[in-house]
Amino acid sequence: MESFEKLPSHVSIIMDGNGRWAQRHSLPRFKGHYEGVESVRAVVECCCELGIPYLSLFAFSEENWNRPQDEVSRLMELFALSMKNELNNFIKNGVRFVVLGNRERFSENLNSAIDEMMRSTAAGSALTLVVFLSYSGRWDILQAARKLAVTHPDGNFGMEEISSALVTSRIPDPDLLIRTSGEMRISNYMLWQLSYTEIVVVDTLWPDFRKTSFLDALREYEKRDRRFGKVK
């Protein structure tokens, strides 16, 4: 594994292009999601090898509930199957698994499987893998506002209190956001947290995104001069 002078502490990925990948291969859309699991595995392994402590993946947005019911059902099955298949590998490699999002619409069985996966991997210290399921940035800000309306009814709160009320309060903001498939938008994802995140957009569809693509994105990040609104 090559070395880097500057690595992000938190890489986040909008995994886009599964459906288009399937169409290009004359396959049903859900086959693209299944192939995308291999890309997740490759990126997780790479983060562990490089010592990147946080990786987050935008897997299913609140808006994705509006997709065809068959595709949504297949995705729910894939989430459950992937957790079952990866549990031992995560424990072995010190990967802590976390799910963030609005889980009210998930089945009782899926929620139980998520909770068990998080409990079983809670001691992992090599990598925290955050999977955003049924998540949107606007929902996150709204639920934070509702919390603060109760805890600070006088409206006397600032940016730190808002950050602490978000579901991401226990993880650092992303240093690098990678979006696959060439789309130039953030799709209602971590709207508060991405304020100074470096963004790298690649044309590669997610099922074709492997270690080489990930390393290329890290090289691009290494070139960036992060000033956070200041001057040199």
Image: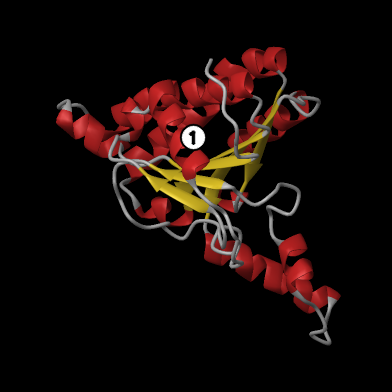
Seen in the picture, residue 188 relative to 64 is either above or below; the reply is: below
For the point 44% across and 22% down, which residue is it? 211
Q: Nearer the viewer, residue 194 or 105?
A: 194
Residue at (14%, 27%) from the top-left corner? 26
The residue sitting at 71% across, 34% down in the picture is: 115
Seen at 71% across and 17% down, the residue is: 91
Q: Give the percent coordinates (x, y) of residue 65.
A: 42, 52
| Residue 92 appearing in the image | yes
The front one of 48 and 24 is 48
Instruction: Give the left or right position of residue 151, taking residue 218 as reference.
Output: right
Query: Toward the viewer: 88 or 116?
Result: 88
Asked where in the image residue 25 lies, by quadrant, the reply is top left
x, y percent for residue 145: 69, 73
- Residue type at the position of mark 1: Leu
Pointer 1: residues within 10 angstroms few (<14), some, or many (20+)? some
Residue labelled with disc 1: 218
